[in-house]
Amino acid sequence: MPDTPTTRRPEVALFIRTYSRYGGVELFCHRFHEYLRARGVPVRVLCGEVAPGMANKPMEKTSPAVPQDDGGRQHDADGPGNAPWPDDAIRLADPDAAPLAVDIRVLGLWRPGRFMKNLGLHFAAARALRELPPTTVTVSFGNMAGCHIHRSGGPHRDFMRRSLAAQRSPLRRFTKALSRLLNPNNLLMTVLDNGIYTHPATRRIIAISQNVRAAVARQFPHSPATVVVIPNGVDKRRFNPQRFADLRGEARRAVGLLERHRAIGFCSSNFELKGLDRLIAALAHLPEEYVLVVAGGRRSRKYADYAQSLGVEKRVVFLGKVGAADMPRFYAGLDVFCHPSFYDTFGNVVAEAQAMGVPTVTTRATGACDLIDDGRTGRVLDDPEPWALANAVFDLRDIAAGADFGCVEDDAQVFARYLEVIEAVRAELAAAGKS
């Protein structure tokens, strides 16, 4: 039965700092927004800012208490083919749906710096929550307390402690820990976490991995919210074994790989935390036909120098930043993918590689390790030390890339599970309102 003024479902409000198609949580929120609209769910986004190029029509905007500028905004680097539910599909599902831009409310960010941005967004979100109708189900994709559902990438304190393992030197670990303790933004983030996980309005925590669930249980054992684990999915129209086969030859030629080469892939914007130095060191323990292809990062010079010091510089290819539209091609050229991270609450690159059928080596500190069938679709290590990485990569030599591993959900399936959580919370709110 079509919605009428009396039967139309209550609204869903999604809160996020930056509305964008670039970045992990940002892309997830954007695509979930489109998913809800395509199914006729009344939804709006309340964000601190909108990435340039996201919308070409005026949006509702609340003036921030501190003036803004355009400095430091992250530009949209998304390519074609990333929107599985375009406006045409949305209008087909709900002919009365407004253009995408008009259901985005910009709350504004204080500036300069992350501390001011996070603090300003906290106050702006609190005001916006008070203004929403009581029937609205609210979902937070960031550090904003008071929403009914919080999608959690893990408590900030857990990141502060566990990510120190990436530092090889004990002195470096000490100085890194000290600098973090003295950083006011880190103190703010732990305070905001406490507000989120202990807030009486929080009814569900959606943990993106079992690692996150365990961290929440350790730090907030008395949280009033129910924790639900829903791992991230991928867009299987883009990441699948057929695309691997279609792009394989082109992808290897573009990097200069020969038939005899065994390509190891690595992709990250944070080379230190994700263990690139250990992987370069592992390359020195592997046969000459193994070549490392590195995507992402901003400061590759010291890693190139490190490869040279080990005598493997001719076997390492630095691609620089690879756009989202080109990631399927990147995976298609590989024989094995490595994500030797010291801390990653999920690791979307692991899910994408597995969806493409690329055997993957990762660590137990990576939430997406749950996707891997150890020994069949990859290897999961306790510690990403060079010898262990080299052995794991070599162990996978007989597993042909491009198979259908069947271990990753399509993001539409994941979004359907999120919608089930929203409907459950809506029912609880309705029951509480009647009591």
Image (spheres, rainbow, N blue to C red):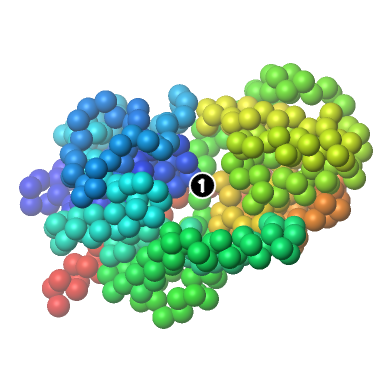
Asked where in the image residue 51 lies, by quadrant, the reply is top left
Which one is in front, 120 or 286? Answer: 120
Task: For mark 1, give the secondary structure.
Answer: loop
User: Which residue sits furthest bottom?
Assistant: 222
Residue in the image at 36% along x and 43% along y: 18
Which one is in front, 24 or 184? Answer: 184
Asked where in the image residue 177 lies, by quadrant, the reply is bottom right
The quadrant in which the C terminus is found is bottom left
Is 77 displayed left or right of 390 in the figure?
Answer: left
Work out whether 111 lies above or below 365: above
Residue in the image at 27% along x and 70% along y: 201
Work out whether 229 lies above or below 22: below
Is 96 displayed left or right of 321 in the figure?
Answer: left
Which one is in front, 354 or 327? Answer: 327
Which one is in front, 41 or 306? Answer: 306
* Other residues around mark 1 within 10 Å, as few (<14) / some (14–19) / many (≥20): many
Residue pointed to by mark 1: 233
Residue 115 on image: x %, y %: 39, 55
Is 91 displayed left or right of 412 in the figure?
Answer: left
Residue 140 on image: x %, y %: 34, 56
Is 315 displayed left or right of 187 in the figure?
Answer: right
Residue in the image at 12% along x and 52% along y: 7
Residue in the image at 35% along x and 50% along y: 117
The quadrant in which the N terminus is found is top left
Amino acid bearing label 1: Gly
Residue 249 on image: x %, y %: 72, 20
Q: Please say whether residue 140 is visible from this viewpoint.
A: no
Q: Please say whether residue 405 is visible from this viewpoint.
A: yes
Residue 118 on image: x %, y %: 36, 54
Work out whether 238 lies above or below 352: above
